[in-house]
Image (cartoon, helix red, strand yellow):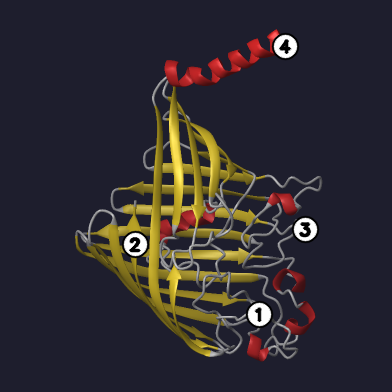
Amino acid sequence: MKYYAAATTSVIALLAQPAMSFGQSTVTLYGIIDTSAQWQQGMPQGHSYSLASGNWLPSRWGIKGQDDIGGGTRVVFQLESGFSSVTGSLGCGIFCRRATVGLTNPTWGTVNIGRIGVDELQEDSWFVDPQVFMLFGLSTMVRGRNWTFASNSIEYTSPTWYGVTLKGQYELTSSATWNAGNPGSGPGQLNGPQGRSDGIELTYSNGPLGLQAIYDEIRSPYGTFNNVYQNSRSLLLGGNYTIGHVTLYAGFQHLSAPQASINGYFTDAGAVATSLPGGASLPTAVNHEWFGASWQITPVTVLTAAYYHANANNGNGNANLYTLAAAHALSKSVTVYSEVGLVTNSKASNIGLGDGYSDPYGANVNNNPSGGAADFRTSPDYGHSQTSVIAGVIKRF
């Protein structure tokens, strides 16, 4: 008993030691509340008026901190939870947006491990998006493929050398089968299990020029690339260039899912698959291009306009997105914004102005011949257009 008491005392002393001996600890509570009004026209069942949370910056709160352990090295951690500012509910469980601990040093870079969550590499593509990941932007034409999640992650970020930063991620699967996942390996993009995912990112930012290249792979729980909008390979190349108060943007993204399957796309697989347009089968590749510009009208006001285009193979047609947005900072912590989006589809396409989660690929409720789809899909009918307007406010703390 004396041994255990002595051991316990030693452990307590050891746990208390870093704060007393090595350096300063800091802990920060932070958050964002983003609430907007939205009008949407062109859904299969009419139009809608609604309030929404996170139409630009997802509503969230978190805790982050660091401990200086000497030699320029710090231990860092971050816990982040998403929530709806409309209903008050959690987005996907406590700290599902991020839960990591790591080491950082100005000489060799930063390593983080844990639930990378919303910081999967594709999220960094906001850097080359004219609309900076506003609701209608870089993720719209690829049905949310750039809003990706990652668990069981190891991440390395290099120091910046002459404007160049390298980042790499690898997600383990907690599975005995290579590439495959299990219920404990998620949640992935749609809050379910995911297979192995990995990626690498190279960003250059120096003066007026910014360039970015991102390659990543996200596999299904079965270890396959079975859905071009969710479980696929992605190569993204883009850049921006600033001339005075105007910044120009352009980019290209290629998605590939050579093992596309009905089960990878649809829950009521047999019925919905029969309602695809004539001559179309499941897409295995998508090409996505965009260009746009932002104009810094005043130090606190910016106006942006952009065009996005996507074309899916195997007879799935193409779609165009036209956007116009404005943002104005009322203070250092309060911003108001608005955006208008118009999407047009060819006769075999049904891309909508959704976030990729409420409008997955496939038929809408009203053109499903079995009537078996239980969800209210927001994407338009094949060949139809859709228009939406949002106006919101962001409060940071």
Q: Secondary structure at mark 2?
A: strand
Residue at coordinates 71% horizontally, 59% vertically from top-left? 220
The numbered dot on residue 378 is none
Quote the CA–CA distance across marks 2 and 4.
57 Å
The numbered dot on residue 222 is 3
Residue at coordinates 67% horizontally, 74% vertically from top-left? 283
Q: Amino acid at mark 2?
A: Ile
Residue at coordinates 19% horizontally, 59% vertically from top-left? 299
According to the image, label 2 marks what residue?
Answer: 394
Q: Secondary structure at mark 3?
A: loop
Q: Earlier in the sequence, mark 1 or mark 4?
A: 4
The reply to whether the C-beta atoms of the residues labelled 2 and 1 are less than 8 Å apart is no
Give coordinates of residue 298: x percent, y percent.
18, 63
Quote the CA–CA distance across marks 2 and 3.
39 Å
Q: Amino acid at mark 3?
A: Tyr
Pick whichever, 356 or 95, lies toward us.
Answer: 95
According to the image, label 4 marks what residue?
Answer: 1
